[in-house]
Image (cartoon, rainbow, N blue to C red):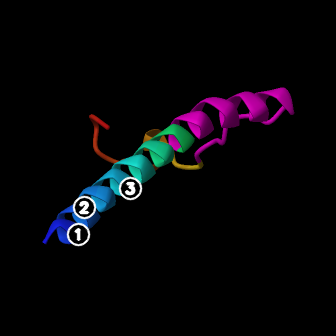
Amino acid sequence: MNDGTRSTHSDILLLYAARGVRGFGDGFAIIILPAYLSAIGSAPPRSAWSPARHCSAPRC
């Protein structure tokens, strides 16, 4: 019975560790990727969609 509790506890710790590593990686990518793209001279993407071109209602 003790082995099942220990296994569950270690699984929970492993899950939290994996989520922490993933969160760190996501945050790192959010900071580093735009800085890298700016450094190599990449411009932000432009959208081809414009409300003025695609909306016929007077208040768009």
Q: Counting other residues with Cα less than 10 Å from the Cα at mark 1, is it few (<14), some (14-19), or many (20 or more)?
A: few
User: Where in the figure is residue 40, as x and y percent of width and height?
Assistant: 86, 33
Q: The disc labelled 2 sits on which kind of residue? A: Arg
- Front disc: 3 or 1: 1
- Front disc: 3 or 2: 2
Between 40 and 1, which is closer to the camera in this rendering? 1
User: Where in the figure is residue 13, as x and y percent of width and height?
Assistant: 33, 51
Secondary structure of residue under mark 1: helix
User: Where in the figure is residue 33, as x and y percent of width and height?
Assistant: 68, 37
Q: Which residue is mark 3?
A: 14
Q: Which residue is mark 2?
A: 6
Secondary structure of residue under mark 3: helix
Q: Which residue is mark 1?
A: 3
Q: Earlier in the sequence, mark 3 or mark 2?
A: 2
Considering every residue shown, the one lying at the far front of the view is 2
Q: Quadrant of the C terminus?
A: top left
Q: Counting other residues with Cα less than 10 Å from the Cα at mark 3, is it few (<14), some (14-19), or many (20 or more)?
A: few
